[in-house]
Amino acid sequence: MSRAVLKRMAEVSLESGGCVKFDLKAWDESLHRALCGASNRITLRNFEYLSGWIGRRPDPPLVVASTLLVPGYAEADEVGRIARFIAGLDADIPWALLAFYPAFEMHDLPTTSRRQAAECLEAARAAGLRRVRLGNTHLLA
């Protein structure tokens, strides 16, 4: 999205008490293209830009993120790269690591395992993030 639209979204969120949620699918651009068919560079730049607004209203958090733990794609090493990026901006940005369930175009992949989820959570914490959690835990295999 354009910077002007992002800025307006942030202003509305600040006024309304809402948040801007980023879906950070991958750090590696090639991996992101495999998952989404597009580059992640604008998303990462927008996330970095908006993280500079956090001090305007830290609670409730203005910026939050999530990553779907797709087996074979969003494994602990990739999650660690995303986590280091987030922690370098603000270690208190809330981040949800979400269990994956096979559906639609990705129905041939397995569900996120408990092992993968634990390894990803550990990688995020090892990067220094303080507000990371596992979501969709009922889907874990």
Image (cartoon, rainbow, N blue to C red):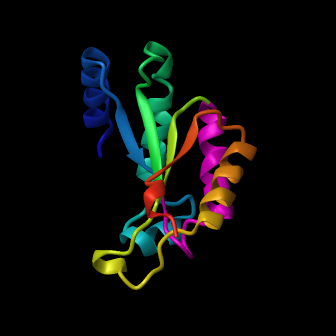
Residue at the location (43% across, 54% down)? 136
Looking at the rendering, the stretch of residues picked out in magenta corresponds to: 68-91
**What x and y, as percent, mark residue 81?**
65, 54
Q: Is residue 79 left or right of residue 66?
A: right
How many numbered marks appear? 0
Is residue 20 visible to the viewer in this orientation of the structure?
A: yes
Q: Nearer the viewer, residue 21 or 34?
A: 21
Q: Is residue 85 magenta?
A: yes
**What x and y, as percent, mark residue 70?**
49, 68
Q: Nearer the viewer, residue 20 or 11?
A: 20
Residue at the location (45% across, 81% down)? 109
Q: Nearer the viewer, residue 7 or 140?
A: 140
Compared with 138, 8 (above or below) is: above
Q: Is residue 83 left or right of residue 62?
A: right
Q: Is residue 27 magenta?
A: no
**What x and y, as percent, mark residue 30?**
52, 71
Compared with 36, 108 (above or below) is: below
Residue at the location (58% across, 40% down)? 132
Q: Quadrant of residue 88?
A: top right
Is residue 40 visible to the viewer in this orientation of the structure?
A: no
Residue at the location (56% across, 76% down)? 72
Q: Quadrant of residue 90?
A: top right
* Residue occupying the far bottom of the picture: 108
